């Protein structure tokens, strides 16, 4: 839904245009459904505003009424067909959204208002529908009720569908411009009717100038996995009909008319994602069925790292046996309001369902003040990375933490053998885990008293990414059920080097010897306490780092699905015995330059 900004008042903020070459015009919006879509723009932005208040002769009134009822009948048939197509593809409660639209097609008030305008004022059918919907829309939007505003959007969608069928019958569908067979939809607001053409084929991607994340159309877009962006300021001014568009709804960006190089780069990524998405129908590819092992036969455990449902699907499609880390930030970053308990519960339950029986480790919300989430931070801190972030932020906003814990407890079926696994970010000492256990106990007790089913079996793990956690690794291993190493963050904090600062990029080219020593102590602590230990992060799969990590004794890796093939290929080239000797020597080095020498030596087979 819109946040209250009036449409068409001429005050819309102009787009912040970046250099047109090579990336083209770049606009930013709010991700509704993540994913990548490439295609030609087709605009749908004047459906209800286009019909002028025209009159018809008295002898044509009956004709207009007949047209109305034919279009209503066609619209009902389309919605019933669409319900059938969506059955089994989206949750049943979301298919029932279409029942609301079917009800409006039979609503006596809506039908009577349109017919009265035709009979008493001799309005054309198009003008009558436009006026009735506009009047309802104006009334509903004046009321501070999200439910009534949702009804306004649903009624508008129904009106648009009826008008589209009239246009189809007259041979003048849309604005007079034929839509491509597949296209990126550009519209003013997100609409269910715009997500499908009249044959109920879904579009490639959706970008809208207004709208939010709670509408019925947004819910369906997420379930249908149609990459969708809303709130893109200046979109209708910038996106011409037929323009080439790249919708990166994971990053929240749409690029209009980029050059061929940029198109090719995104095209390769899109192809890779589609290949993985198609796996369930075609079977797990041969390369993914290979056991993750080193050249000399040491077997590793590989789980998936994901942050949205498509990535969970990709992991399951590739036969990955677990989601070793699910980042839970997405729902908190796509709207200004805190997500409801129901929205969180539904999302986490979907993650568990899409994992197809594989265990899932959920990382608690990990957000610092640089992301400007108002209900978590009043303002940006002087040093966000060392401020209220991770579990530190959640303790400061305990209501947010309790809501997330309740949603997680309800996500895993109570009668399931699968335990709920929760990883705690930015742990400093055992006090963080103990306090979280107390809150978990209280939330379980509250759910039990309320008679709400939830998963009783919970495993609580610590993410080791702060220097304090490294020094206290033995204590944390005794307190926690498992440990995870956040390698990227650990390097950043140990080396006091901002990983987003390009000027410090060399600090992350290979693992610093002091970072290696920290990892040695973590591995030893986990082994002594007999606790599972895994490692995740962008730098984990780096060919320069992988031999060291294997050589230090790490045997469980969380890898993004799209990086799995590269990881398995790199792993097969690692000789674990040689890597063990190299890692031991590198960890005793006194500076990064010496470690780099070992990296080069290992690559060229000089260190054995």
Image (cartoon, rainbow, N blue to C red):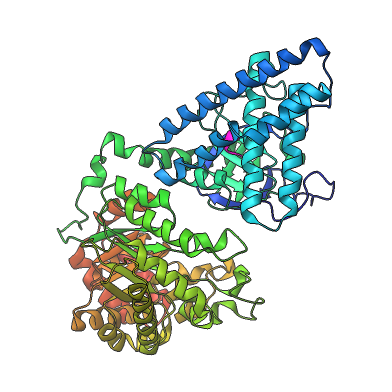
At horizontal 69% and vertical 22% (from top left) the residue drawn is 177
Residue name at image x 25 percent, y 83 percent: 525
Residue 63 at x, y = what percent? 71, 13
**Which stretch did the figure color magenta?**
190-194
The quarter of the displayed image where residue 463 is located: bottom left
Q: Position of residue 102 (x, y in %)?
A: 54, 34
Residue 15: x and y, percent? 75, 49
Q: Number of callouts in the render?
A: 0
Q: Is residue 191 magenta?
A: yes
Q: Would you say residue 144 is visible in this rendering?
A: yes
Does the segment drawn in magenta span residue 126? no
Q: Position of residue 204 (x, y in %)?
A: 53, 35
Q: Nearer the viewer, residue 414 or 225?
A: 414
> In the rendered image of this protein, does residue 301 appear above or below residue 391?
above
Specify the quadrant of the image occupied by residue 109. top right
Q: Residue at x 42, y 35 (%)?
A: 86
The residue lying at 41 percent from left, 77 percent from top is: 465
- Toward the viewer: 54 or 15? 54
Residue at the far left: name it. Answer: 297
Q: Nearer the viewer, residue 133 or 157?
A: 133
Residue 234 falls left or right of residue 386: right
Q: Which secondary structure is most common in the magenta stretch?
A: helix
In the picture, measured across the screen, residue 495 lies left or right of residue 143, that is left
| Left or right relative to 571: residue 51 | right
Asked if one can make out residue 243 in the rendered structure from this viewpoint, the answer is no
Front-lying residue, 338 or 109 = 109
Query: Which quadrant holds the C terminus?
Result: bottom left
């Amino acid at each position: 839904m819109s946040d209250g900004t009036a449409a068409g008042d001429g005050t819309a903020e102009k787009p912040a245009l970046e250099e047109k070459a090579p990336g083209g015009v770049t606009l930013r919006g709010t991700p509704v459904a993540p994913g990548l879509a490439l295609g030609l723009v087709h605009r749908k932005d004047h459906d209800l505003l286009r019909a002028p208040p025209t009159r018809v002769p008295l002898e044509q009134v009956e004709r207009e009424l007949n047209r109305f009822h034919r279009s209503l009948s066609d619209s009902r048939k389309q919605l019933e067909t669409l319900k059938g197509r969506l059955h089994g593809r989206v949750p049943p409660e979301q298919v029932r959204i279409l029942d609301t639209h079917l009800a409006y097609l039979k609503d006596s008030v809506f039908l009577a208002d349109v017919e009265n305008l035709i009979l008493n004022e001799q309005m054309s059918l198009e003008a009558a529908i436009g006026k009735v919907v506009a009047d309802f829309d104006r009334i509903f939007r004046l009321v501070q009720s999200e439910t009534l505003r949702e009804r306004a959007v649903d009624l508008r969608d129904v009106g648009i569908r009826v008008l589209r069928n009239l246009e189809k019958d007259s041979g003048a569908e849309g604005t007079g411009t034929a839509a491509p067979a597949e296209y990126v939809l550009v519209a003013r607001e997100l609409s269910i009717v715009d997500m499908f053409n009249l044959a109920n084929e879904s579009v490639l991607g959706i970008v809208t100038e207004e709208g939010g994340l709670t509408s019925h159309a947004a819910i369906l877009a997420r379930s249908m996995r149609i990459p969708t962006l809303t709130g893109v300021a200046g979109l209708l001014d910038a996106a011409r009909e037929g323009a080439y568009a790249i919708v990166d709804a994971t990053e929240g960006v749409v690029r209009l008319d980029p050059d061929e190089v940029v198109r090719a780069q995104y095209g390769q990524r899109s192809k890779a994602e589609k290949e993985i998405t198609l796996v369930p129908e075609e079977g797990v590819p041969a390369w993914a069925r290979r056991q993750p092992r080193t050249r000399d036969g040491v077997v590793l455990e590989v789980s998936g790292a994901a942050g949205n449902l498509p990535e969970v699907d990709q992991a399951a499609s590739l036969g990955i046996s677990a989601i070793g880390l699910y980042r839970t930030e997405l729902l908190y970053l796509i709207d200004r309001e805190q997500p409801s308990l129901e929205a969180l519960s539904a999302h986490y339950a979907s993650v568990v369902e899409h994992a197809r029986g594989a265990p899932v480790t959920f990382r608690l919300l990990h957000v610092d003040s640089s992301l400007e989430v108002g209900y978590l931070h009043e303002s940006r801190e002087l040093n966000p990375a060392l401020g209220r972030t991770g579990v530190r932020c959640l303790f400061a906003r305990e209501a947010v933490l309790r809501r997330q814990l309740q949603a997680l407890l309800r996500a895993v079926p109570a009668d399931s053998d699968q335990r709920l696994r929760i990883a705690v970010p930015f742990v400093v000492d055992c006090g963080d885990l103990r306090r979280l256990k107390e809150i978990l106990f209280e939330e379980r007790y509250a759910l039990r008293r309320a008679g709400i089913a939830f998963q009783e079996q919970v495993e609580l793990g610590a993410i080791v990414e702060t220097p304090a956690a490294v020094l206290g690794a033995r204590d944390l291993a005794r307190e926690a059920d498992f440990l995870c190493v956040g390698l990227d963050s650990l390097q950043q904090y140990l080396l006091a080097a901002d990983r987003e600062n390009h000027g410090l990029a060399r600090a992350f080219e290979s693992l610093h010897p002091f970072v290696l020593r920290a990892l040695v102590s973590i591995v030893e602590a986990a082994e002594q306490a007999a606790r599972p230990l895994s490692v995740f992060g962008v730098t984990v799969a780096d060919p320069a780092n992988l031999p060291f990590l294997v050589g230090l004794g790490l045997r469980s890796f969380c890898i993004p699905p799209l990086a799995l093939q590269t990881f398995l290929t790199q792993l097969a080239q690692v000789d674990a015995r040689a890597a063990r000797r190299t890692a031991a020597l590198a960890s005793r080095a006194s500076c990064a330059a010496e470690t780099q020498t070992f990296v080069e030596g290992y690559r060229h087979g000089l260190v054995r």
